Image: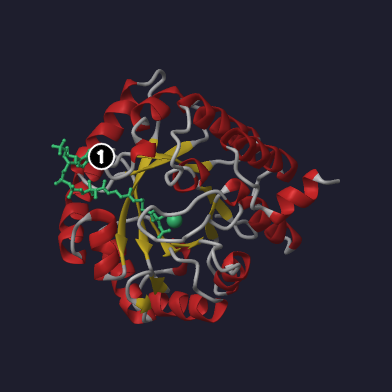
Amino acid sequence: PAPGTVKVVEVGARDGLQNEKTPVPTDIKVAFIEKLLDAGVKHLEATSFVSPKWVPQMADASKVLSIIPSPPSVVYNVLTPNLQGFEAALAAARASNPPKKIEVTIFGAATESFSKANINMSIEQSIKRFDAVCQKAREEGVPVRAAVSCVLNCPFEGDVDPAQAARVVKLMYDMGCFEIALGDTTGRGTPAGMKALVRACIAAGVPVERLSAHCHDTFGQGVANVLAAVEEGVRVVDSSAAGLGGCPYSPGATGNVATEDVVYMLHGMGLKTGIDLDKLVDAGAFISQSIGRRNESKVGVATLAR
Ligand code: HMG
Ligand code: MG
């Protein structure tokens, strides 16, 4: 991002909705994405091309990707853990009229137990699968992003050593990923841990411009952890409108840090995001009401109460 700006990656339509037990109708997902676009969001995770047996909520991935609008300034991101997902994503993007520009995310973990629980592979096996996706993506001209889960804490292994997480982040960087999201999957991380992690990634040879803070707010640390990352020079943040979400393989995990709360903080610090906060609050209110969830954004709730 340009100096003085932060790139906000809205993950509500994917991370936010993937854990909902009741199927969210495709047209609600699409309407939510349209409202986010209207609020000026330029980077968003639209869906994931994963096994519908593992994550039933994302079974309509091709449909979502083909019917969402195609504004020229927007590149949609979709999760693709393997070639099967990559090929399905590319087919859906190309079949839509006009064809859509996409980028894909490969997603691994800093711990073996979470890698096994989330994608049914060891870290080493996952790197082989991801490498195949990266090579194919390169041939097709599709940029690849990465997410690494459990960079601060793991639901099965407890606190994670920053050097252990940085090793996996570096593997993703070496594979050619243009950005790597640091996933605090359980939300148990604290600002001191986030700072140590960012420094460990830089020490491992990953430029800070390539890192994104992907914080979950389960323990109320989301905004503080984002601030810690920003203070260390990170300028990309993943967040969900209304604080939607939770990971199906992280027991008890609640939503991502709320985009409204992140944007409010960043604007207060004089950093630009290009997002219209009032419209974003409306998008968060819309999706919370549509799926019958409490709005988890403090800024959202306070703004709506005015
Ligand atoms: P597997 O069962 O080991 O895969 O799952 P497989 O290759 O043996 O295939 C088994 C079946 O799945 C086959 O179907 C395949 O066709 C199908 P069958 O023959 O039995 O009918 N399959 C697929 N179907 C659709 N799309 C695909 C696909 N691949 C295989 N791409 C696999 C391995 C990775 C596929 C599975 O474990 C999976 O889909 N996992 C996804 C888990 C997930 O989506 N987790 C949430 C996203 S990550 C996250 O939220 C964390 C993040 O936010 C950061 C953070 O906060 O930490 C990013
Ligand atoms: Mg997540």
Taking the view exactly as shown, the residue that stands out farthest to the right is: 306
Q: Residue at x 34, y 81 (%)?
A: 163
Image point 71% across, 56% down: which residue? 298
Residue 245 visible at all: yes
Residue 99, given in percent of the width and then of the height, sits at: 38, 24
Amino acid residing under circle 1: Phe
What x and y, as percent, mark residue 209? 47, 63
Left or right: 208 as drawn, with respect to 221? left
Q: Residue furthest top?
A: 97
Q: x and y percent of residue 79 in the render?
A: 34, 45
> In the structure shown, which secondary structural element does the residue marked by tag 1 occupy?
helix
Foreground of the two, 90 or 244? 244
Q: Is residue 87 left or right of residue 64?
A: left
**Which residue is depicted at the point 23% across and 61% down?**
116
The residue pinned by badge 1 equals: 86
Q: Is mark 1 within 8 Å of ligand 1?
A: yes
Image quarter in which the N terminus is found: bottom right
Q: Position of residue 129 (x, y in %)?
A: 17, 53
Whether residue 72 is visible here, answered yes or no, is no
Indicate the quadrant where residue 78 lies.
top left
Q: Residues within 10 Å of mark 1 (few under 14, many from 20)?
A: many
* Residue at image point 60% right, 46% down: 241
